[in-house]
Image (cartoon, rainbow, N blue to C red):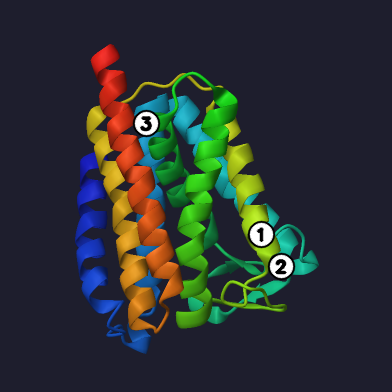
Amino acid sequence: MGDRIFYFFTGWFIVGFILVPLDLVPPWLEWANSVFLIAAGIVAVTYFIHTYKKKAGLFYSTLVFTVSIAVEQFGVQSGFLFGSYEYTARFGIKILDTPITIGFAWLLVMGCADVIARGIVRHSRFLLAIVGALVAVTMDLILDPVAFQVKEYWIWGEGGLYYDIPSQNFLGWFILAFLFQSVLGFFTHHPVSVWQTRMSLVFLGMIAMFSVTAFAGGLLLAPILVLILGAFWYTLFKRKKARHEISE
């Protein structure tokens, strides 16, 4: 089942990589973007199940989905954590004021953050949470500008230095990702090589797709910055992972 989900996502990703950056998705097919994020989130759930076993993986996935929706909903209403913003109708079906795709997007981000952080850090829960949170923020540095400036999935009520996004948003992302990654630090880690590879490639793929979309949308700083940071994290991940495997 997990293999089929990953292959479905991969096929959808390839099509999206061609259509989305070139803005070739017609209005009647806008729902496909939501399906893509949902599929990506399910891939992350499958990664968690294989890496932390079924009960722990499902518990953690449910936790991330539920808490992220709740926090985002509270944020929309109060401006807490991420700043003042509201979602448009372009981001799919909503639970109250928050699209359900947000929960799947957080699952995707935390799956990518965990696999990279786990490859880099082995013996410190605190450092694991720090690295995981930094990887998550790295992804947000490209996700938010594209979603806001190019796709208009949400609208900020206040500006900021980085593409008119409040700086508070990135601090909020770090805090929430740190808490999510901290929870994983208490679970027994059972790395499965094929899913480590798959999830790390999803990390690269998402950065590549959103960077190309950003370039196509006229954004320059975000994709350059995130491509550099993404390459740094992935290179560190590969080198540290190789050293850990040799020492074992």
Dot 3 falls on a residue whose secondary structure is helix
Q: Which mark is residue 230?
A: none
Q: Which mark is residue 76?
A: 2
| Residue at the spot 37% in from the left edge and 31% down from the top edge | 119
Query: Based on the displayed image, in which of its 4 quarters is residue 238 positioned?
Result: top left
Of helix, strand and loop, which one carries label 2?
helix
Question: Which residue is label 3 attached to?
Answer: 119
Tell which of 91 and 182 is nearer to you: 182
Distance Cα–Cα, label 3 vs label 2: 34 Å
**Is any atom of residue 32 visible in this view?**
yes
Q: Quadrant of the N terminus?
A: top left
Q: Cα distance, mark 1 to mark 3?
A: 29 Å
Give the mark nearer the N terminus: 1 vs 3: 1
The quarter holding residue 121 reads top left
User: In the rendering, at what x and y percent does residue 181 appear?
Assistant: 55, 36
Kindly state the secondary structure of the residue where label 1 is placed: helix
Give percent across and percent down for residue 21. 30, 77
> Residue 14 placed where, x, y %?
20, 65
* Contact (Cβ within 8 Å) of mark 1 with mark 2: yes
Furthest toward the top, the residue is 248
Amino acid at dot 3: Gly
Mark 3, residues whose alpha carbon is within 10 Å: few (<14), some, or many (≥20)? many
**At x 45% / y 81%, what residue is drawn?**
150
Q: Are marks 3 and 2 in contact (CB under 8 Å)?
A: no
Q: Residue flagged by tag 1: what amino acid is it? A: Glu
- The CA span between labels 1 and 2 is 6 Å
Residue behind mark 1: 72
